[in-house]
Image (spheres, helix red, strand yellow):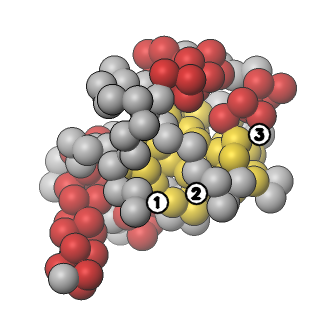
Amino acid sequence: MRRALSWGVCLTLLSAISAAAQVTPGGPAGTPTGAGMTRRASTLIGSTVSVKGGTALGKVVDIAIGEEGTVDYLIVRSEGRLMAVPWGAVSYTAGATTVTVVTPIQRERLKDVTFEESTWPDFYTEKWRKSAGTVWGEKTLRRPPLKRKPGTPPPGSP
C-alpha cells in the first residue's frame, strides 16, 4: 500500500511540475526545449533559489503539492531554516539549476514565511495565507484557502 501511494505521489508530482513549470527557449546545450520537454522533480530539487538580480536565498529541498496536484510552494533551506516560496512568485526554466524569485520582496519580512523542519505550518490556514500574501503578494498564491471545520487536521496529517 505504501509503495503504491509513493508511486501515486511521484506521478502526481511529475504531472504538477509538467503543468506548472514555465519552459523558455535556450536551455543548456543539447537540452531539448519547448512543449515536449520533460520536467522532472529531481532537476528542481537542489536548485538554487535567487532573487531577481542575483542574491541567493537558498536551495530547494522539497515541494509542497496542493490537493489538486499542483505545485503550491517550493520549500527552500535558508540559513538553517525552511522557507515556503509560492510557485507563483518564481520563474523556472526546465532543466535550469536556478529558480528565480520574480516578485519584489522585503528581505526582513522573510522570517514570516520560515519554519523549522520539525514544525511545518498548515499552508492553507487564513493566518498562513495572510503572512505569505504580505511577504510574496496575494497574486503569487495559487488558490483560495481550503474551507475546513475548526479542529480538522490538514490533509496528509496522521
| Nearest to viewer (mark 3 / mark 2) | 2
Helix, strand or loop at mark 1: helix
Residue type, label 3: Thr
Estimate the x, y position of residue 129 in percent, counting from the top left: 51, 24
**Labels 3 & 2 near each other (Cβ < 8 A):** no
**Labels 1 & 2 near each other (Cβ < 8 A):** yes
Nearest to N terminus: mark 1 or mark 2: 1
Seen at 74% across and 46% down, the residue is 56
The foreground one among 96 and 58 is 58
Seen at 62% across and 16% down, the residue is 134
Work out how far the residue at label 1 is from the one at label 3, CA to CA, in angstroms.
18 Å
Q: Is residue 14 left or right of residue 103?
A: left
Q: Is residue 98 above or below residue 132?
A: below
Estimate the x, y position of residue 31 in percent, counting from the top left: 34, 65
One can see residue 25 in this view: no
One can see residue 64 in this view: yes
Q: Residue furthest front?
A: 151
Residue type, label 2: Val
Work out how far the residue at label 3 is from the one at label 2, CA to CA, in angstroms.
15 Å
Return the mark for residue 60. Answer: 2
Q: Which residue is mark 1?
A: 44
Q: Which residue is mark 3?
A: 55
Residue type, label 1: Leu
Estimate the x, y position of residue 86 in percent, counting from the top left: 49, 35
Nearest to N terminus: mark 1 or mark 3: 1
Instruction: Say which quadrant the N terminus sits in.
Output: bottom left
